[in-house]
Image (spheres, rainbow, N blue to C red):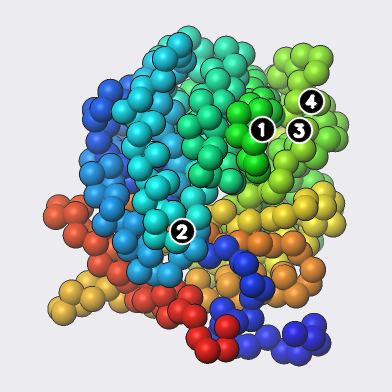
Amino acid sequence: MATTQPLPAAPRRADFPDGFRWGCATSAYQIEGGVDADGRGESIWDRFCLASGRIRDGSSGAIACDHYHRWREDLDLARGLGLNAYRFSIAWPRVFPSGRGPAANAAGLDFYSRLVDGLLERGIEPWPTLYHWDLPQALQDRGGWHSRETVEAFADYAACVGRVLGDRVRNFTTHNEPWCSAFLGHREGSHAPGLQGWQTALQACHHILLSHGRAVEALRAEAGGARAGIALSLHPCRPATDSVADALAVERHDGLRNRWFLDPLFGRGYPADTWQRFGCNVPIVLEGDLATIAASTDFLGINYYFPERIAAAPGEDPLGVKVVEDAAVERTATGWEVEPDGLVELLDRVRRDYAPAEIYLTENGSCYEDTVEPDGSIADGERRRYLQRHLSAVRESIVRGVPLKGYFAWSLLDNFEWAEGYTRRFGLTHVDFATQQRTLKESGHWYREFLRPTTHD
Ligand code: FCB
């Protein structure tokens, strides 16, 4: 298609390249339940949910979508949608209940082996993520991500998964959103393990990035044709006003939100301006660490949800910034700004500044209240429109030359939304958590129609 032609109002699958991966994404703790099944160990999220006041509705992922027992039905749903790829995560505490070997828990590994086979039988490519926030509690008890021992434990775990699944899985993602693991978990304390300190968070962050590099090496050593990448949550950052102070604040905020991850992963080390702001809180970085973090990868995963507006806030924290809200802009039920153009801008920037060989949108989605109609159907027109508008942005980015190779909608199912419990729904499929009944929403029906091959494909 010529780049000068106007884009179609509603995206059509035929406008995307052949071989594009069309998926949905989920994560283990958010959907599996079965927390005591088959020798699974305790994770930091099991422990975090026990403390009162941590989770908005006092719930936990103990049952969640009961996917551990209903996975066949869920894979049928994925096939029914017409997906050709599915991103899920592996629960480390199922594989190593106390974090490390010597022996792996065969029953836990078998679950993922069956899941991978089930996907392949349905013509869906498995895209596992090794870490979507559920660290074995036993490792947390020995220091968690603040300790270097966890880095080596993660490399062993990656090697084990590579050995067992590497004959059937090609694309492995090491970490999901290290910003959240490090800063929500160790600075704000709103996520497990609920710690609050800049040094703790920055050290944990360094070890998470280091463990990514070690895992890439381990996966390649154990699984011949393995391709590896990481999924980052990235945000376009905008100044709250036209002032010079806010423009400078944007730079500082971007230094932690985006560059703190992209720079070292792409071989530039930590951004010097941001490093300086952290003073005595900077992490201990040993010789060779930066080279390990910069391990060459096959793809960059980007999770895109919203842009951020930044104002200068002297003395606020080491960065002297605050995130502000513009009352006039469109938002989802989580308060996140809806801005498909922000995705185009972000992808342009990542391509220009870092030139990854391949990019996958490993998450994108929206939270809205579902309306259950009298006939049982679920009207979620806002989510459908959100999906359409973001797919148009994906299309535009491809036309602009971004090497975008796949899109994973968050999420296949409504699920346990971390500190928000079950109060926030992101699924293309509605889950009635009392009965575990799944019902495809209007957005899911639209995605299915969009993905349906036509004679023009
Ligand atoms: C992302 C997380 C995912 C889910 C969505 C809504 O930050 O990776 O698990 O919570 O947000």
10 Å neighbourhood of mark 3: few (<14), some, or many (≥20)?
A: many
Mark closest to the chain's N terminus, 3 or 4: 4
Q: Earlier in the sequence, mark 3 or mark 2?
A: 2
Residue 293 x, y percent position in the rendering: 74, 29
Q: Amino acid at mark 4?
A: Leu
Ligand 1 has an atom within 8 Å of the beta carbon of the residue at disc 1: no
The image quadrant of residue 151 is top right
Residue 83: percent from the left, percent from the top? Answer: 46, 65
Name the residue that disc number 4 marks: 290
Q: Which residue is mark 1?
A: 220
Residue closer to the observer: 356 or 385: 356
Q: Are marks 4 and 1 in contact (CB under 8 Å)?
A: no
Counting from the top left corner in percent of width and height, residue 335 is at 47, 58
Q: How far apart, in angstroms, are the residues tagged by discs 1 and 2?
A: 23 Å
**Taking 305 as reference, is 91 above or below it?**
above
- Judged from the image, the secondary structure of the residue bearing numbered disc 1 is helix
Mark 2 or mark 4: name the one nearer the start of the chain: 2
Front label number (4 vs 1): 1
Q: Amino acid at mark 2?
A: Ile
Q: Are marks 3 and 1 in contact (CB under 8 Å)?
A: no
| Marks 3/2: CA–CA distance | 28 Å
Mark 3 lies on residue:
295
- Visible in this render: residue 152? yes
Q: Nearer the viewer, mark 3 or mark 4?
A: 3
- Direction from residue 225 to residue 25 in the image, left or right: left
Secondary structure beneath label 2:
loop
